[in-house]
Amino acid sequence: MSTSDGTGPVPPVPGNGQSRAHGKVRQQVAELVRTPREPALRRQVARTIRDRYHARTDRWVGAVGGHGAIETLVVEREIIVTRSTWEDEGARSYLEIRGLERASLEAPGIDDRVVLLRARDGVTADELDDTVAELRLRGFAASQNQVLPCSPVVKNLGGPALATPLEPFVPTPVPNAPTVAIVDTGITSQARTDGWLHDVPRHAHGANVNVDPLDFAPRDGYLDLCAGHGTFVAGVVARVAPMAQIRVYRALLGGGVGTEIDVAAAIVRAVEDGADIVNLSLGSSTLYDQPSLAVEAALDRIEEIEREQGREVLVVAAAGNGGDTRPMWPAAFRQVIAVAGLTASHHAAPWSSHGFWVDCSTVAEGICAPFVKGEESYEFTADPDDFPADSFALWSGTSFAAPQVVGKVAALMHEHGVGARTAYALLRATGTSIPDYGRALQILPGV
C-alpha cells in the first residue's frame, strides 16, 4: 500500500459502509468453505466456465472425476506428453492406434520439451484418461491438457465487495526497480484518475495482448466471471511494493481459466522479458496428483535462464482454496513458493489448501486493492455490486495472499540490493511457523 508519495504504508480506510463490507467478506469466506463440499454448485460453475471458455476459444472444457472433493478440469480431446515419450516408437504407435495426432503447439520456451496431441471427434475425456493411465503404467509421462484456473471451485463465486478507496497513488521512480510479472486474466484498459496501476503496460493488439476484456462472453453489460482478477492482484503488489515495475500477462481466458500450456508459455515469456518475480494466483489439483508437464517444462527453462544469465528468479503461487492437504499445482512444485491463507486474525484459515508442500502463508480474508469499473451479475451473486470508476474492492482467497509475498520480496530486493531468492529468505525469517501453513508472515491487514 502507499502514501501519497508512493513510498510507505497507510492504514486501511474503512469509511462508510464498513458493516456491509465486513458482512460481504464473511460471505466470501463462507463460500470458500462450502463450495468444495457441494458437488451441485461445482457442476454449475463448471458449466458456466465450459460455455465461456468455448465462446473465447472454440474449445471445450470438461471435468474428470479423479479422487477427492474437487474435480480436475481438462481441455477435451487433448493430451500432453513429454518429447521423449513422443520419440519412443512404442509410445507413439500406441498413441496413433488410440486415434491421437500431433497438434500445433504455439508455446515458445516449452515447445521443444512437450508435445500436444489431439484426439478425433467423439473421444471422451474418460477415454483419454484411460489412454493416459495406460501410458503411465508403461513408464511414460503423459497427462490430459489440464486447466489451471483462478476459479471455478477455488474462488468464492460471488466475487469481490465494494470498498472505500485508499489514498491516491503517486509513483516514485527508482533505478533498477524489481520487475514483477503477473500471469493472470490480464489488466483492465480502463484509465484511473487516482494513479493506481497507471504505469502498468497495456497491449490491446498483437501477439502479447494482456488487456482483460471484462465483459466478453456473453457481452451482456455485466462483469464476466473472474473479470478484474488480474487487475486486483496487480493492485495488491502495488500496495506492498509501490516501487516495483509491474507487468501483466494474460493466460486465463473465459471464466478465468487457461490451459497449463497457456500458463507455462506466459511464465517463460515473462522471465525472458526480464521478470525477477512471477506471481501465479491460479492453480488446480491434477489427475493422479502429479505435476503439470507443461509448467514443469517452463520451470526447467527458467532454471536454464538463471544459469545462462546469472539471475535469480522467484516463482510464487497461490496454494489454493481446497480446504484440505491435497497438493495444488503449480504451487506444489519444489521450485515454486506456495502461499496459503490466514484469517484476518492471523490464524490458519480452514478453507485454505495446506500441507507439507506449503512454504508460507499470510492474511487472505478481506484484502483491499484497486478493482475495475463494472456491474456484477445476478448469475454469480444474490447481492451484486456496481463498481464505479477508480473503485476499490475487498476480496478473499489465496489468490490475494501470493501477491503480498511477491510485493514484499520486491520491496526487500530494493531495500537490500539483493536477488529475489535472497530477499525471500530474508522475508521467511520474519515469520512464525504454523504446521501445514509454513511460515506465517504479517504483510497486509484483512477484514
Image (tube, grey):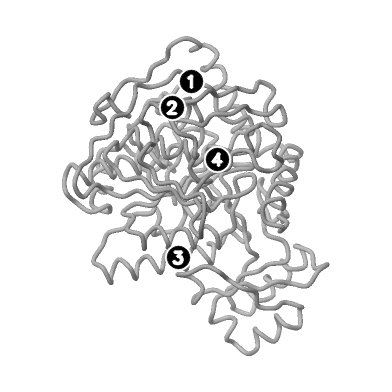
Of 258 and 104, which appears nearest the observer?
Answer: 104
What SS does tag 4 mark?
Answer: loop
Disc 3 from disc 4: Cα separation: 24 Å
Disc 1 from disc 2: Cα separation: 7 Å
Which residue type carries mark 4? Asn
Circle on res. 163: 1
Circle on res. 321: 4
Q: Which residue is mark 3?
A: 298
Check the image and name the residue furthest to the left. 416
What SS does tag 1 mark?
Answer: strand
Mark 1 and mark 2 in contact? Answer it, CB < 8 Å.
yes
Which residue type carries mark 3? Ala
Which residue type carries mark 2? Cys
- Residue depicted at x 63% and y 80%: 138
Q: Which residue is mark 2?
A: 368
- Residue depicted at x 65% and y 88%: 90
Residue 369 occupies quadrant:
top left
Q: Position of residue 299 (x, y in %)?
A: 42, 64
1 or 3: mark nearer the eye: 1
Mark 3 or 4, nearer chain start: 3
Q: Quick one: label 4, few (<14), some, or many (20+) residues within 10 Å?
A: many
